[in-house]
Amino acid sequence: MSQTGQHWETIIGLETHVQLRTKSKMFCGCSTAFGAPPNTQVCPVCLGLPGALPAANGAAIGLAVRGALAFGCTVHPRSIFARKNYFYPDLPKGYQISQFDQPLATQGTLSFVSPERGAVTATIVRLHLEEDAGKSIHDRFPKATAVDLNRSGVPLIEIVSGPDLRSPAEARAYLQTLKQLLEYIGISDCDMEKGSLRVDANVSVRRVGETVLNTRTEVKNINAFSFVEKALTVERDRQIALVESGGSVTQQTMLYDSKENTVRPQRSKEESHDYRYFPEPDLPPLILTPEFVAEQQSELPELPGQKRERFMAQYALSREHATVLTASRAVADYFENVVRAPAEPQAAANWVMTEALADAKDHQEQLRVAPGALAQIIALVKGGTLSNQAAKRVFGEVAAKGGDPRTVAESLGLVQVADTNVLSGWVTDVLGAHPTEVARYKNGEVKLMPFFLGQVMRASKGKADPKLAQRVLEEKLSA
Amino acid sequence: MSDAKAVADRLVKAKRLNALLTPPKDLRKSLLAQAAAARPTGVLYGMPIAVKDNICTLEFTTSCGSRILEGYQSPFEATAISKLKAAGALIAGKTNCDEFAMGSSTEHSAYGRVVHPLDKSRVPGGSSGGSAALVAAGAVPAALGSDTGGSVRQPASFCGVVGIKPTYGRVSRYGLVAFGSSLDQIGVFGRSVHDAARVLSVISGRDSRDSTCEDRDPLRLPTVPESLQGFVIGLPREYFPPELDPAVRRACDRAIRMMKELGAAVREVSLPHTAYAVPTYYVIAPAEASSNLARYDGVRYGPRFDGSADIRALYRATRGQGFGAEVRRRILIGTYVLSAGYYDAYYRKAQQMRALIAQDFRNAFDRGVDLLFTPTVPSPAFKAGEKLNDPISMYMSDIFTVTANLAGLPAISLPIGRVKGLPIGGQLIGQAFLEDEMIEAAYALERVVPATDEA
Amino acid sequence: MSVSREDVLRIAQLAELDVAEEGLPELAEQMSRILDYVAQLSGVPASDNLKPYVPGPDAIRFRSDEVAPTPLAFGPAVFAPAFKEGFFVVPKLGQFE
């Protein structure tokens, strides 16, 4: 709700460009490796030299098909590459080889959890293949632009959603889910910092209750995940303020400025976006045989949604816990390896979600404790050899230095004492040292039990098995 | 084996033609080095072959007859050139041509027009005029050109030499500077059918770098046949209209008579959509060209024309001044027919018309015809300057040649007579990938037709 | 149909080509004549189902995903009109981002 009390609805659609994980470029054999010195991974084709011609990368086509299948798209057996014509210094041929009216795939879906609306299914209108442009760097030389064509020709898929997202936060959730899905199936690194995942947004607003879609703007230059929600919020607010003050939204491209957290129009002398698409005459039609598509299907791993449902059923986990454990393939596989070691699923889930993930967060997402070792720690707690606290310490040690959990526990002197004789000794000492409290307890103040227990733990320097100690205390106090 | 020095001398002697763009000094130096390195076991060992300047070579610059690529040295060579060198041939310099292969007279070169070897007031044809002239003048036995709408066959006809355009996809286009991507093929000029066919055979065959090149073995040359017994030659009536120059008609009639005498069956056929071929071509070719020439922007190679203000100024100055008038005109036409609102009416319509034209040929061949015979051009070489002010008149000289490019079919022009001393060519159009039949018939006709006699 | 001076300027802008003011009327006239000439295609009946014809192979060939770049006889530093610290250099985009 805005300041005037109007109820506004935000309509957002996202266009996501994802770099495919191939060794060579889309239309030539140059390397796609990130970080090489400028203009060293180039050839006649990706430089746009006179006489060069494209030759399509089969692996890129396969990965694109896998992406399309993961979204449940209709994969078209026949699609056409097309030229998108425009002039820009990092677009060497003066056109980009892309796909236009006969794309690789259409009509898929992506289900995700919206912070406001719960489960949402967005439409994937289309998914198509194209080549990336090079990089223009505007601040390296004064009054000039530096162009690096290493990136020119890297394979991309463009994923276009319908205008199905209803808030900046929702857009973020959609993007997060999309990223997770593509990482799962291994077709891209999806790293916004490295530019292997880029997003542009289409934003419009309307009053709640309206059914027509109003003029939308395009928001570009959203360079990090954390900027997605901010940029869209800023644009939405701008549009609402504009309309409320009597103005109207003009169709234009807005660029996000992360330093100022603002958007400003991309100024250009002419807004001519006439790309003059026509079928690429240097490439025959892209024909996908049923065998090829079936092969891509068989290469798909279990998708996150499927895995989550299975975890809930197989390991009796709540939806929330299953969601955390399937957030990445690495974590999901780790959890299952712990269970297989063997370990009791509930305990494994708890340990992975708390200790393992916390440790990973501080150590470049590495799950440092081997699944077998974590399973042993869990067993030591279950068997009473370690208290929970002690086990966490052992976990930390094994994470940092490795080693066998039991040996580590022993060397740290953390092995719990479950010997009733020794326990009796401590209990007797404690009860002897606090006669007043004993009397009060025997008089009915059973709330003093934790006090006695605490004292026994102190006396034992934390080594007493608390459950057993409590039993011994109860025995002696009832005597 | 030609003496490298002698080859250079012959080429330099033909200076007056303005057909060779390579400076004599560079030519001599390179030929000596190439001769020393040439493979003696190659089938074209020592054969000097001049190359149209829109085909990338490592030995010489590639300017495409344009200012916008003046002095451009390509860092890679065309597949066709690699194949020639592997066969022991010598790359005997780069030849003058209409800028970016757009033209029918070689008057649209930024480096001056090429002169017809027999009459200096006339054009040699285009766009591969330089290559045709050098072969006609005897400076080289063979030369490469490119044929998008007739740019090898028409100059071959004007200059009195053999010119072959292969089936689309027979010869790799990798390294041929693109003009009309779905129409372009590298073609060959020769003094004889045999010379041209030998060279074509070497440059043909699969190339993984060109996605439009068919995965086939190189062309196998047929033997010279005893007769044309068993051949059915079709004469498309639309190529022999009433208004055809009577001398050209006489030359064709003579050639047809000779083919009959050799045992060929001759019958009239119809290719009903022929009248639409030139307009169809002049939508598709400029459209593809407008996109293919977008890369000439002064950013990565070639000269920059002043436009230091900003990048758009650089583009506009470089392209406005670097391209000649004909190229600019075609880029504008091409941009127009692809632009929003016009795409369906022009480009899409033309591609549909192309399907009808291709179907015409398939129908004729399906009815038992092996080859078609037509005049190559409606008239002999015209005078320089005659058609410069009338682009459409210039375009009309392609009327008999554009159909083979639109349908992707192979075609050959060979000299069949003279009209007032000027050569005139007859064209055989073959079926896709059946160049051998076409060459066979050409061998037979060549042997008997009095190519230097007045028609 | 006629191509106006403004049409020519608009198309020239799309094609990033300078056209001299003096040459505009003649260019507009030539373009009009050429476009009128090719417009005769619109008179030919052709059903919308008629598929366009493009010669060449029926299907794209798949290249294997190997790092095997075409070797360049020399790098961009040699043929680039302006090259500095490994980058192509162009004048700034001015009003563009």
Image (cartoon, rainbow, N blue to C red):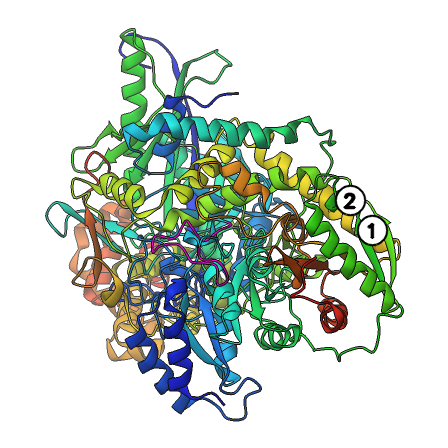
Q: Give the main secondary structure, helix, strand or loop, of the magenta stretch.
A: loop
User: Residue C3, position in %: x, y?
Assistant: 45, 23
Of callouts 1 and 2, the N-terminal one: 2
Along the viewing direction, whichever of A260 and B48 lies nearer the viewer = B48
**In the depicted view, which residue is nearer to us: A164 or A19?**
A19
Give the residue pinned by disc 2. Answer: B271
Secondary element type, mark 2: loop
Chain letter behind tag 1: B
Q: Is residue C50 left or right of residue B265?
A: left
Is there CB contact under 8 Å for labels 1 and 2?
Answer: yes
Q: Judge whether residue B62 can be spotted in this image.
A: yes
Question: Any mark on residue B364, and which?
Answer: 1
Work out whether A89 lies above or below C70. above
Q: Quadrant of residue B259?
A: bottom right
Alpha-carbon neighbours of circle 2 within 10 Å: few (<14), some, or many (≥20)? many
Q: Position of residue B102 (x, y in %)?
A: 47, 49
Residue drawn at point x = 35 percent, y = 86 percent: B33
Identify the residue at image location x=56%, y=51%: A281
For residue B380, side relative to residue A476 (left or right) = right
Is C84 rendered above or below residue B295?
Answer: below
Is B107 one of the magenta-colored residues? Answer: yes
Q: Within the magenta stretch, is there residue A286?
A: no
Region rendered in magenta:
B104-120
Chain letter of disc 2?
B
Q: Quadrant of the C terminus of chain B?
A: bottom right
Residue at point 63% right, 29% down? C40
Residue A455 placement (x, y as % from top left): 21, 58
Residue type at numbered disc 2: Leu
For the residues beneath circles 1 and 2, the answer to whether they share a chain is yes
